[in-house]
Image (tube, coloured by chain):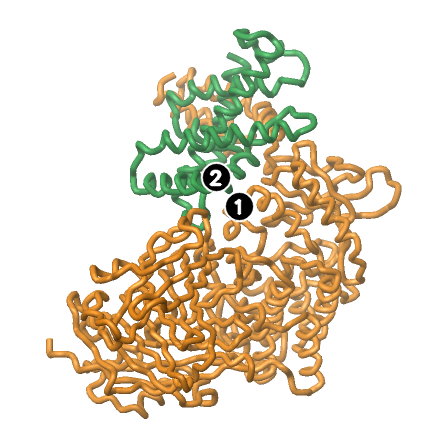
Amino acid sequence: MTREHWLQIKTVYQEALAHPAEARENFLEQACAGNFSLREEVNALLAAHQPAEDFFNRLTRELGQTPELPWRGRKLGAYRLLEELGHGGMGAVYLAERADQHFEKQVAVKIVPQTLWNDELARRFHHERQILARLEHPHIARLLDGGATEEGLPYLVMEYVKGAPLDRFCDAQRLNVSARLRLFREVCAAVDYAHRHDIIHRDLKPANILVTSEGAPKLLDFGIAKIMSANNESLGAGLTRTGFLPMTPEYASPEQVRGEDVTPASDIYALGVLLYLLLTGHAPYRFHKHSPQEIARIVCEHEPELPSRIIFKTNDVAQASLPADKSVASLLNDAPHSRNTKLTPEVVSACREGTPSKLRRRLAGDLDNIVLKALRKEPERRYASVEEFSEDIRRHLEGLPVKARKNSLWYRGGKIMAREKRLLLALGVIAVLLAGFLWIKPALMARLEEIFPMLEEETEIVCRIEPARSSYVVGKENTMTVTMRIGGLPMAGIPARFEVMAGPNRGVSGSATTNTQGQASLAYRSRGSLGTDTIRVATVYEDSTYVRFAHASWLPQGTLFGPLGAPVGKLKSGDPIYGGISCEGYRFSESVIEAHGLVTLQRIADNRLALQIELRHGDPNFTYAVEVFEAGNDCVSSDLGATGVFLAADEKGNGHAEVILQLPYAPPQQHVLGDGKGTEALIVVLHWVDAQKGGDRFSTDAMPLPTRPNE
Amino acid sequence: MPALQTQEVTAILHRLQQGAEEEFPRLFQMVYHHLRRLAVQQLRGERQGHTLNPTALVHEAFLRLVDQSETGWNDRKHFFRAASQAMRRVLISYARRRNAGRRGAGQQLLPLQEMPGAEGQLSLELLAIDVALQKLAAFDERLARLVELHVFGGLTLNEAAEILEVSIATAKREWASARTWLYREFFLE
């Protein structure tokens, strides 16, 4: 057959199929217009259409492909499948009944495609099932049974719950904020019960929380995510952790999208997302591409809008969750979402508190704080338990003071993380390119406070930039290197350590703290090589495969970095020195997405430092605390060249830091803090955590940069 | 070491994305060897041991061989194209072995109607599809690729449509044409 001939046949055949059977004859009459062989070929294809479809349906079923499988009516173990209840990322859910009619019990059967049933999965499954069988709670749907289909697809048999997804129930019933909170607390009680039995849900979302016609919530799929991810984990080596965990991105916590261990705090986070949705109708995060990278970036880095503010936004309605069973349609008959395609302030408030301004007043303060506390990026800064979360809501409902407090500058300014329980000093540097001929400090500070509203109440000025010891050098390629000396740091007795984190799209960042001798330092570059003057010093690698490029370099005190970070000047014997590490790039032998390092510096001679690098991965205890920000830009600027933070302290414990930044010396642009006239300033926000006294401390100062030469 | 393989496959996908078509055979080889290993594992683990599940195998290979954080959809298209071809070869060589084992090596394919029983039928059907598909590819390559993705690669029509960059409606129409032609080819002609 020739290509042309076939294409003609195919076209007519496809068009004929598009016509209803009774109109086909007429169509063929015209389309073939006397071409008998064409007509004959098409007729033959049409005659074979149905048998071909049946044949291939059977064939693909035998090959284990699910999409075209007619599940309805099939028997799985003791159960016969009835109708499909819903379809989601983790598979399809069917209503089923016991085939032997032994009990007239209806169940829900979940079939999970694209996962092979194997011995490992079977073992994990039986193990988990024993654990899950212990869960007996009125608000938790039970896992009854499970196995594998003939094709080898795992299925789970669960208690069947007639109900509507929590969010849609609340909207349809037009529950006000207090009623929603009370219902939410019932959900919390169930999750808390499971946590006390060491079971984490891992996939809490409205589709997994149904409300029955009696108004009682029922949680589905407890622990299922773990069973289903067991297969992937057994495959291995964490390659797939970010991409394919059966989690719902909107409800996944930062630790989940990073593929780290899931803890009860992850459920607390998901409950936070849920509460955010119940109170505002909006999701705290919106994804556009749903690529693993985008999800990871948004979940780990973006701060959600305050609930009391987001309600004034207009958004498209998020995708409908698992379609509700027809039998509960009465619960949903008046759901606003079914009528509107957009979330507007009016729609959102109409089914909650009446008007947008009433809803805002209801949410502002306590509820904003409670929701955001549950949504903290760092697990340990969320509520310590679901019970505590629920208790805070109770206190709010009863008009008692709540524990949750506003997010601090820690979040807003630098998103600097501190996980260490010990006193940890972290320096956050915010480099702001500022235009304006005369730099007036109060004006700058006022502007800063606009950007970081928390600053005013939480700042205590202790650090200061020492102008006499700060300087800059304009280098080649439109860069300038700034060295700032910041005095007044409270640094005595801080253990020596700094840690380095590397990750995709992130470059390298690190933090520095002083060691017991009062000296530690860090310098690093995000890209490129440091320059020829870099000298390797004694470097001890725990495992040389982990780090390819790490140079330690020494710098005479007060040295300025030259263009592109090459140190200028020579080290003389006896000069006080700062050790440094510059990481040109990290290369990991395993497919590790993040690695966390512990670096210790030790002075072994006047001009030599021993540098020990220990990189661990899979360890959530890492800190990265120096980040360079550009105003108005949410993320670490990778354009910045060599950046360094050198910390030192004298015997009395008075510390100082030297901050070295390489900045683009580009034509003036419209910057957040500027008016485009040419002078720039650096603003330093110093942040440290005093775990002994408790809480975050902040300090800020600013430094003018030179007027640009006229261009 | 799986991690090294993953790095290499991911790197090849990036190069393919930049137009280095000559890398495709290498990708195919790597995916093929991996799929064959997985298939052996699957058959060993299965009690009844009669079928390979392409959907599961291809997706499993994808999870193992592609660094999800480093690849976008466009890279993945190349992967699934290669994986479907590789899976086709795995299924066919498996079917040949089964067929040979039961009926003696070198046996001519018999018309399917004459084959007794359901057991082993699938193997013969796959062999028949493979042969017919080679013919189809000669005058409608896109159709043949669709069949390869859907039947041998175990991808849904939606996934196949995305890979071939056609609408789902087109994929459905094309699939209907393909299966009818194939069916006629090996049953009636």
Q: Position of residue B186 (x, y in %)?
A: 52, 15
Query: From where the camera sits, is residue B174 visible?
Result: no
Mark 1: few, some, or many residues within 10 Å (few <14, many ≥20)? Answer: some
Relative horizontal placement of residue A163, taking residue B93 as reference (left or right): right
Residue for point 66% across, 18% down: B119
Q: What is the letter of the orange chain? A: A
Which residue in the structure is indicated by mark 2?
A: B2
* Quadrant of the rendered image containing residue A235: top right
Residue farthest right in this picture: A102
Check disc 1 and report its element: helix, strand or loop. loop
* Quadrant of the rendered image containing residue A583: bottom left
Mark 2: few, some, or many residues within 10 Å (few <14, many ≥20)? Answer: some
Could you say which is closer to the camera, residue A527 or residue A87?
Answer: A527
Instruction: Classify the position of the N terminus of chain A by image quarter.
Output: top left
Which residue in the structure is indicated by mark 1?
A: A237
Relative horizontal placement of residue A109, taking residue A239 as reference (left or right): right
* Structural distance between the alpha carbons of marks 1 and 2: 9 Å
Residue for point 12% across, 79% down: A709
Check disc 2 and report its element: helix, strand or loop. helix
Query: From where the camera sits, is residue A531 visible?
Result: yes
Relative horizontal placement of residue A443, taking residue B67 as reference (left or right): left
Residue for point 28% across, 72% down: A661
- Could you tell me if the residues under marks 1 and 2 are in contact, i.e. CB atoms within 8 Å? yes
Q: How many marks?
A: 2
Mark 2 belongs to which amino acid?
Pro
Chain for mark 1?
A
Q: What is the letter of the green chain? A: B
Residue for point 46% across, 29% down: B32
For residue A430, the mark is none
Q: Position of residue B40 (x, y in %)?
A: 57, 27
Mark 1 belongs to which amino acid?
Ala
Q: Is residue A452 above or below residue A477?
A: below
